[in-house]
Amino acid sequence: MAKRGFDIRKLRGFSGIAMTCFVMLYMPIVLLVVYSFNAGTSVAIWEGFSWRWYVSAWDNEMVQEATVRSLIIALSAAAIATTAAVLAALATTRNRKFRGQTAIFALIHQPLMVPEIVTAVALLIFFATIKVATGYTGLMYLIIAHSAFCIPFAYLPIRARLQGMDLSLEQAAADLYATPFQVFRRVTLPQLWPGILAGAMLAFVISLDDVVITEFVKSAGQDTLPTYMLGQLRRVVTPEINAISTVLLMISVLMVIAYTLLSRTKK
Amino acid sequence: MTKAITAQSLRKVYPGNPPVEALASIDVEIQDNEFFTLLGPSGCGKTTLLRLIAGFEHPTSGKLDMFGESLLDAPPYKRPINTVFQNYALFPHMTVAENIAFGLQMLGTPKASVNATVGEMMELVQMSHLADRQTGQISGGQQQRVALARALAPRPKILLLDEPLSALDFKLRKQMQLELKRLQTETGITFIFVTHDQEEALTMSDRIAVMSNGAIRQIGRPREIYDRPADRFVADFIGDTNFLPAEVISNSGEVTRLRLSSGQEVDAHARDGAQGKVTLALRPEHAELTDDGAGLLAGTLREVVYFGTDTHFHVTLDDGSDFVLRRQNSPADGNDFATGDRVGLTFPAGAAQVLRD
């Protein structure tokens, strides 16, 4: 092996800075997880190990309702966003370049660029008008809002997968008498699955985690898990919050691991 | 004879800045049951022509007929034409048998008949024992056979082969060349074969179209292409060739009388209306060494290279140009010529070919 001229790992202080960053990032989370097992009522004074706050959270009706609501919204939003993302990804990778394609990319990625608070305020005002006009105050507003901002997260892995796929496979299928729909059904889709699952999971986690837009769009009594937690923090803080956070963290970590495994292309 | 494919003034320009003219204006007729080869260097347009026939690309202008009917409005899945892709393009999520069955399934063939044909095809390409393997678990040569079986299974009227042997090693390639030729004869399907390998083209084809820069330079049987190249490009691309300057003295039918740079006169195979200064093509194995002064041309022997089956003699002619001569070795051969000797060169009347400018 030839000598490398520059290796960042050999820079003085590199390991120190790296360690500091990791500690800053993960220490608070580690503490949060540790205190979720606290036997006492404090989130800062350790009084021994206990599962009590997990039991308490499990038995809390408000938490139960918020969890169910969060899951309904996240699953619906992930499904809708992923469907839209598949269609968008097909249109932007399997068509000849069309006029305004760059504009379409910008529009699809818009939720990543525009400050969330702006989208939140815009949706608040927009949905308020509709609520007044129709009188409907159900979960649909949250589902629509979440679907919208989840699209780019679902779109990115799906598009990456489509671009990495061998175009000659689809041509071979067409050559062997498969109609465009059959090509999609029998050749494109089976290979796209990992990308679709990855996109759906990413969208699910993003939706599950959202506070800002949810806080603005939800009607009274429509707390999701994150907004419920935010509400609780304004009152008495018990390790119950830690327990709920830890469970959410576990779900996210599992999703991220699954996402990484799925988006790895087989070689 | 029926014509499987007829192309008239077929042109393909890829948009861009500047636009790329992949096919200039192609006129070609491919007969039914023919093993037809498109031969040329990379970028000559041979693959583009194949893709136009398959339907993956649309011509910019021109006509393209199959058995007398226009192909231009038919999408690829409505053309009874199958392709063996250069990278094989086997479906990675299907087994060998599923790959071969795909075309028939898409045509809506009843299941029993699909299974029968798939079995037959796997036998034909000697892959029966690997039917349930995933395509990633078989070797390159085996993938090649699966790709071939998959394309043949729906019994297409025309089979397109896009450099299918280029990824195989030498021995396997030789074997597959013979096998492809046998399959073509057995099935009676028109094969259109794309390659940049002139030897492959000469061995397998009924007819060859030599292409360069988006145009067809010559169409003919392998022997015609080799012995009677139409122009300098074809002569140079197919095999080794010596180019000799000459001047036309007279033209009479098949034969042209020429004067060589040495002043000697010789008869060559004619090219219509050749006049004035022309270029002659002469294959290295068609010339013979003679003693100095006895040949049509004279020069100095520069190098003798022994190749086992034959020996190459590099001669610098008196007009300064280089000439290569090839002689088959036999046990009786002695060292009759040595480097530095003055030698003569001769070749029979008709061996040389007058090239088109």
Image (cartoon, rainbow, N blue to C red):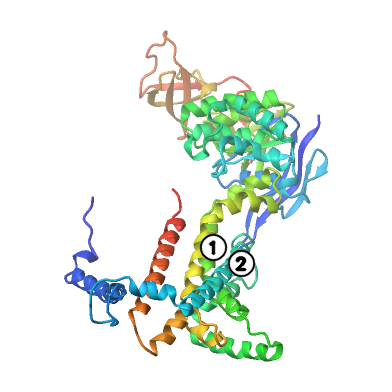
For mark 2, what is the residue? Answer: A88
| The one of B30 and A70 positioned closer to us in this rendering | A70
Estimate the spatial distance between the alpha carbons at disc 2 and disc 1, rounded to whole Å: 8 Å
For mark 1, what is the residue? Answer: A159
Which residue extends farthest right? Answer: B68
Q: Position of residue A221 (x, y in %)?
A: 54, 85
Q: Quadrant of residue B147?
A: top right
Question: Is residue A148 found left or right of A209 in the rendered image?
Answer: right
Q: Is residue B221 above or below residue A59?
A: above
Q: Secondary structure at mark 1?
A: helix
Q: Amino acid at mark 2?
A: Ala
| The one of A246 and B40 positioned closer to us in this rendering | A246
Q: Residue at x 62, y 78 (%)?
A: A140
Q: Is residue A127 above or below residue B317?
A: below
Q: Chain of mark 1?
A: A
Question: Is residue B280 found left or right of A238 in the rendered image?
Answer: right
Q: Position of residue A98 (x, y in %)?
A: 65, 67
The residue carrying pointer 2 sits among few (fewer than 14), some (14 to 19) or many (20 or more) residues within 10 Å by Cα, namely: many
Q: Compare marks 2 and 1 and give the one earlier in the sequence.
A: 2
Q: Quadrant of residue A47?
A: bottom left
Q: Chain of mark 2?
A: A
Residue B268 can be seen, yes or no: no
Residues beneath discs 2 and 1 located on the same chain: yes
Q: Residue at x 71, y 44 (%)?
A: A177
The residue carrying pointer 1 sits among few (fewer than 14), some (14 to 19) or many (20 or more) residues within 10 Å by Cα, namely: many
Q: Amino acid at mark 1?
A: Arg
Q: Are marks 2 and 1 in contact (CB under 8 Å)?
A: yes
Q: Position of residue B98 (x, y in %)?
A: 61, 38
Question: Is residue A113 found left or right of B273 in the rendered image?
Answer: left
Which residue extends farthest left? Answer: A12
Q: Position of residue A240 (x, y in %)?
A: 36, 78
